[in-house]
Image (cartoon, rainbow, N blue to C red):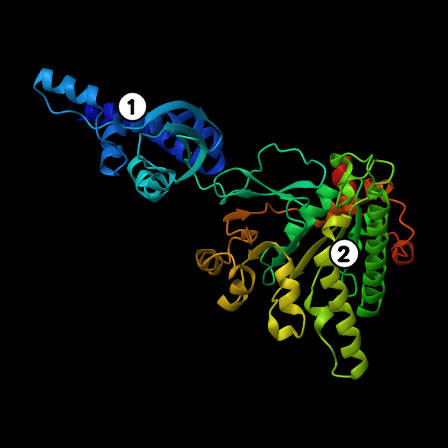
Amino acid sequence: MSELLTTMVGVGGPAAAVVGGARMARHRYPSVHWSVIGLPVTVARMHLSYRDVMESCGLTATPSRRARASARMRNSVPVAATPRRGRLRPNASGFTLRLRMRPGQDPSDFEAAADRLRHAWGVQAVHVRAVESGWVELRVLGRDVLADVRMPRARAEFLRIPVALRADGLPYVRDFRTVPHELNLGATQSGKSVYQRRLIEGLAPQPVALAAVDCKWGVEMSPFAPRLSALAIDPDQAEGLLDALVAEMEDRYHVIRRAQGISAGVDDEEITSDVWGLPDALRPVPIVLLVDEVAELFLTSGSKSDEQRRQRLVTSLIRLAQLGRAAAIYLEVCGQRFGAELGNGATMLRAQLTGRVCHRVNDEGSARMALGDISDEAVQAATAIPADRPGTSIVGDTSGGWSRIRTPHHELTDVAWTCAENAHMVPDLPALAPFAPAVTLAVPSDAVAAKAL
């Protein structure tokens, strides 16, 4: 009996240590666990069950004539044709696999079967996308990448900022030239400000002018003052700043018209309808306007003067949203709610904001304000965001596409330090000079200490 007990302890002890170590690695070092254990097991399971899974998911095709003739010669039943597998490419959270579709198959067939493939192979998710004619790519995830966001290496390019991680493991990039204006909606503590910080940090080292409207007396935007070309902290200052931006936009349109100088000797490719077609010497610097809480611009005390000021503010914002793209003036509008109840002009302004980011909201109506004209599925996904996952949001545009993303937590002091380091990048824009922050705030001491380490 003692020998049996000794044997059990000798065998069970190391086995328990291995199992315990694997579980600990899965939670603390998910990438290592996936590379060492998860990937080999999943790939082996997929190869062993590939034909059966494809057949049960309805992803096989009728055998070719040659296969049927060969089966008749062998007096056997012809085997259904499965999609041909391409090269498997592993990564830190899963792997990608390209499949050559059989004649008559469509990418939508694989999209419809994605959830069944996930269960059959025991993985977290399977995402499908068409890559070229006749081919689809399966992006298989072995773990929930949004549970512990680890941004892949993606360098920011001019006006293209990697902000968050998508549910398929790819970085979500905010491209201002493709989607010039965006609405960022979310309740308190939903991660809306963190998304905004990531944008500011990515834009700070670039030759871009940053202007901000923060009618909460500047509490959100003041830490970034060293990098801001303009900052308005109340509705009166906001009115002046928006008027200056509209005037700047009109001046840029005059530059474009003069540069067009249409004549018989001008080549077609030299004729432009926006500032990006201008020569480098004439092209003005892009301006990104950050509106922290748009509802503050719509609210009034009921007096006639307040109502008139509100109307002027809204009109200026709508003009910037309608015409700013060609003048390289981009809007990033944030708020908790943004609907018709704010007053005249709210719906018109929202319609001009092509990009939509909806964080956790307090009611379905708020989600529908942001995503209702994109997809009903996107609205339902936004209302299902849990409160314990701040930074999670549904992002889409008015073309109808949407995806789930999560912005990694980013300390305010880190962004403030980046803005202070790049204060020399503030461009010389006379139109915005009267609205430059009067006081350049020092970087918080804990950021300085962290940087020194």
User: Taking the image as drawn, is residue 84 in sight?
Assistant: yes
**Which residue of the protein is positioned furthest toward the bottom in this rendering?**
303
Residue 95 percent coordinates (x, y)? 43, 30
- Neighbour class for label 1 at 10 Å: few (<14), some, many (≥20)? few
Work out whether residue 102 or residue 443 is closer to the camera in this orientation and state it. Answer: 102
Which quadrant of the figure has residue 117? top left
Q: Position of residue 135 (x, y in %)?
A: 40, 30
Task: Quickly name the residue at label 2.
Answer: 221
Mark 2 residue element: loop
Determine whether, in the image, residue 373 is placed left or right of residue 213. left
Q: What amino acid is found at the position of numbered circle 1 in the picture?
A: Gly
347 vs 223: above or below: below
Judging depth in this view, the residue of 108 and 297 nearest the camera is 108
The location of residue 257, given as percent across then percent down, is 83, 48
Residue 10 disc label:
1
Residue pictured at 20% horizontal, 19% vertical: 66
Relative vertical location of residue 423 with respect to residue 319 in this rendering, above or below: above
**Residue 48 found in image quarter:** top left
Residue at x 25%, y 38% (from the top left corner): 58
Identify the residue at the far front of this view. 264
- Tally of numbered tags: 2
Q: In this rendering, which labeled residue sits more in front, label 1 or label 2?
A: 2
Q: Nearer the viewer, residue 198 or 285?
A: 285
